[in-house]
Amino acid sequence: MIPWKTATSAFGKLCLTSSNQRFIHTSPATCSVFMKRQKKIDPEIAKTREIRKRKKLEKEIREMMRHSKKPKPVDEMALDVKSAKNLSERIRPPTQLSDEVVDERALVLKEYCRSRSHLMKADEKWIRTSIFLQNKALAELKKLDPKLYEAAIQPDTGSFPQTINGPSLSAPVENYDSPDGEYTDTTRTWS
Amino acid sequence: MNIRLQGHDFVPLEKYQAYVHKIAKKFQFPVVDSYAVAAQTSRATTFKPQSTIVDESIGLSRYERVVRVGPIPAPRVQLFLQMIRAHNPIGVTMTVKEHEKADEDYRYIPDLMLKEKQTELKSLDDPAVRRNLGWE
């Protein structure tokens, strides 16, 4: 009888009864030992401190923005230092061409220029006629139906972005056995 | 509007860029800018069959030129694109899209210190940080 009684009373002391709660202070588990103690700062001083910090940051940002924009170097346009240094090794006297070769080249050049200018003139004609016809069609549309004209004028946002591939050098090779390999992207990133 | 030209061979690429510029002038489009962007380099490696021993390796660069055209009347756009598409040279890929800030930023080296300072300024507005300041 007696040990049982003491056990219950001991247990009773361990429980948080209303009388016991006065002597125990519980705090939530989030309170860790390593947090900085919040020093009481005068609110006005804290306010001025914050305003000063903000102004300083904004000033620094403005200074940086002024000098910031550095364009990425375009390698094919920059001077190739290695080649520039060994230029003296690679100089040779200009080749002497025979008169026949020079004449043939001049004739070929004339043919080429003629074909290019012919093509350019055809392009310009196409541009002029298509603009003229388009204007004419739009004027007619305006007369017939103003609503449709308004719709026709609208910019075409749906079709962009558009990717158009140029023609390939040859048709696809039949039964091409491609070798094992991989592509790795070695683009230089500045970050 | 941005016309972005990419290709592995920059000789026809540059000629094509000049051509696009010329045609834009013929259509009387205001050409804002016509510039080059840093190339994207990649490494193509082939392996010996049935193994991972590197057989050959070659560095390729994809050069990029951009022609930026200002605001243009909508019906002319398709005519312009038809003209350009007809003259697209071998190996050149053209991308036509609206100009965005990201395209402009891609030309420049990102400034890390500036970004740091800007995030710091933004963090001052963060409620968690403001609580620790002591005056709210």
Image (cartoon, coloured by chain):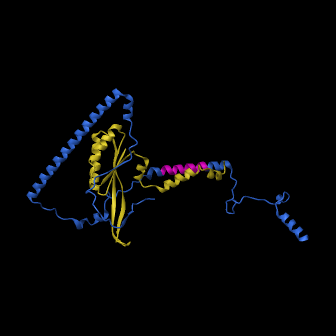
Chain colours: A blue, B yellow
Residue at the top extreme of this rendering: A143
Main SS of the magenta segment? helix
Q: Who is closer to the viewer here, A41 or A15?
A: A15
Residue bounds of the magenta highlight? A50-63
**Image quadrant in which you'd find residue B70:** top left
Please name the residue shown 13% across and 55% down the image.
A105
Q: In which quarter of the image is the N terminus of chain B?
A: top left
Residue under the point 57% across and 49% down = A54
How many numbered marks, from 0 up? 0
Q: Where is residue A14 in the image (x, y as percent from the top left)?
A: 82, 64
Relative image position of residue A63 (x, y in whole percent): 48, 50
Q: Position of residue A145 (x, y in %)?
A: 36, 28
Placement of A28 over or under A162, stated as above or below? below
> Measured from the top left, where is residue B113 in percent x and y?
49, 56
Does residue A103 appear to the left or right of A83 in the view shown? left
Residue plotted at (54% across, 51% down): A57
Specify whether A185 is left or right of B120: left
Tell me if A93 is positioned left or right of A146 in this view: left
Q: Nearer the viewer, residue A180 or B15?
A: A180
From what the image shows, is residue B27 above or below residue B107? above
The answer to if A43 sits in the magenta stretch is: no
Q: Residue furthest left?
A: A100
Q: Does the magenta stretch include residue A59?
A: yes
Q: Could you tell whether A45 is left or right of A130 in the image?
A: right
Find the residue positioned furthest to the front. Answer: A175
Q: In which quarter of the image is residue A177?
A: bottom left
Q: Nearer the viewer, residue A184 or A43?
A: A184
